Image: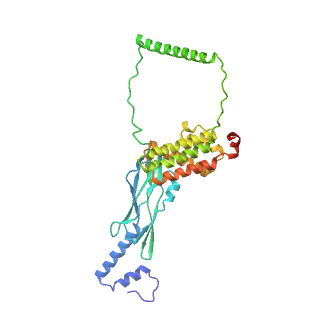
């Protein structure tokens, strides 16, 4: 037996020595509880899974968060770090933590991504409370592949190359086309000659100047808001018309061929105009959402229609020309 005055023994020797006085059954129970608590503490982790790691552009996906520990409450994660890492991320429904058993918490979160490519979801953290103790649980990284809607990778049918065989029928078709073009030119020439041979005095017509670009755009936006197409099933028509009103305003105001340009081309042409970053962001979000609704069949929330309509009106108001420039034309 060790002497009481000997202090060179280690701490766990003392623990083992003291446990000799405890009955064997109680000693075994204490060891099991200690090992179980240690295992739960080490294995505490948030599990993350998704409906699919490959999704279509603008389609809905669901992320499932699960914590299997007996906490009193669960908080988090902070989704702002996801939007900072993936700006194209849109949270459709944040969901709420639900206790599905005595030791399991679960939260379902739906989202969409409005861009194509491969994205890496950052590590998310949640916070669990149990009495006076609090834990931070970390998830794991996930990769998402976003593609265009439809089977873009399907291979087209490969056909054999053959040489066209000319025949009299082909020659007659081309000859008929040439004759038709000649007759059309002759008819146009006769009409022009007929109306230009005499030069009657034409009464002077009053030239009505075109309205300023912002006046036209604000009137069209007011008319679109009064129709409230987003309240029914015509939200796609609403977004298409809102995008076209904005494009026509950009063409009249800045001379950009916006109605015939893609969204990316319009954004590139806006950069040298000296617009503020928030103004460019409003136009970008408005045009991109219209593209998602039109091509990716996205269904945006109802409030987004009113917000984008207000953003378009604000952009037109902030970027209009000085009204004094149109006084001479109106007189």
The answer to whether 260 appears left or right of 330 in the picture is left
Residue found 31% across the figure and 78% down from its top? 29
Whether residue 37 is visible, yes or no, is: yes
Furthest residue in direction top, as rendered: 168
Q: Is residue 29 above or below residue 203?
A: below
The answer to whether 66 appears left or right of 279 in the picture is left
Front one among 179 and 45: 179
Residue found 56% across the figure and 49% down from its top? 312
Residue 259 at what x, y percent from top left? 55, 38
Front one among 1 and 274: 274
| Residue 211 found in image quarter | top right
Q: How many marks?
A: 0
The answer to whether 323 appears left or right of 178 in the picture is right
Front one among 39 and 193: 193
Whether residue 281 is visible, yes or no, is: no
Residue 28 at what x, y percent from top left? 31, 78
Front one among 142 and 276: 276
Quarter of the N terminus within the rendering: bottom left
| Residue 97 found in image quarter | bottom left
Residue 19 at what x, y percent from top left? 35, 83
Q: Is residue 176 above or below residue 310?
A: above
Residue found 43% across the figure and 72% down from its top? 129
Quarter of the C terminus within the rendering: top right
Residue found 54% across the figure and 15% down from its top? 187
């Amino acid at each position: 037996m060790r002497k009481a005055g000997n202090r060179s023994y280690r701490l766990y020797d003392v623990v083992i020595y003291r446990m000799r006085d405890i009955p064997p059954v109680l000693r075994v129970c204490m060891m099991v509880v200690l090992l179980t608590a240690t295992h739960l503490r080490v294995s505490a982790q948030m599990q993350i899974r998704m409906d699919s790691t490959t999704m279509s552009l603008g389609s809905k996906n669901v992320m499932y968060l699960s914590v299997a520990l007996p906490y009193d409450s669960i908080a988090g994660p902070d989704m702002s770090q996801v939007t900072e890492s993936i700006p194209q991320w849109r949270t459709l429904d944040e969901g709420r933590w639900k206790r599905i058993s005595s030791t399991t918490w679960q939260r379902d979160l739906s989202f969409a991504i409005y861009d194509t490519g491969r994205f890496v979801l950052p590590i998310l953290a949640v916070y669990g409370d149990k009495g006076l103790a609090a834990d931070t649980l970390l998830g794991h990284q996930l990769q998402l592949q976003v593609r265009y809607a439809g089977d873009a990778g399907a291979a087209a049918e490969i056909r054999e190359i053959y040489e066209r065989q000319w025949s009299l029928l082909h020659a007659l078709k081309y000859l008929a086309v040439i004759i038709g073009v000649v007759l059309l030119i002759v008819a146009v020439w006769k009409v022009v000659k007929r109306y230009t041979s005499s030069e009657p005095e034409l009464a002077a017509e009053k030239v009505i100047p075109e309205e300023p670009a912002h006046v036209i755009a604000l009137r069209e936006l007011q008319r679109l808001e009064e129709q409230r197409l987003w309240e029914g099933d015509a939200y796609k028509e609403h977004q298409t018309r809102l995008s076209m009103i904005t494009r026509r305003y950009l063409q009249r105001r800045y001379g950009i061929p916006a109605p015939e340009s893609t969204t990316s081309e319009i954004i590139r042409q806006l950069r040298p105009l000296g617009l503020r970053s928030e103004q460019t962001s409003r136009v970008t979000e408005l045009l991109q959402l219209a593209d998602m609704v039109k091509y990716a069949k996205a269904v945006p929330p109802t409030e987004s229609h009113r917000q984008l309509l207000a953003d378009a009106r604000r952009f037109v108001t902030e970027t209009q020309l000085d009204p004094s420039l149109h006084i001479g034309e109106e007189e």
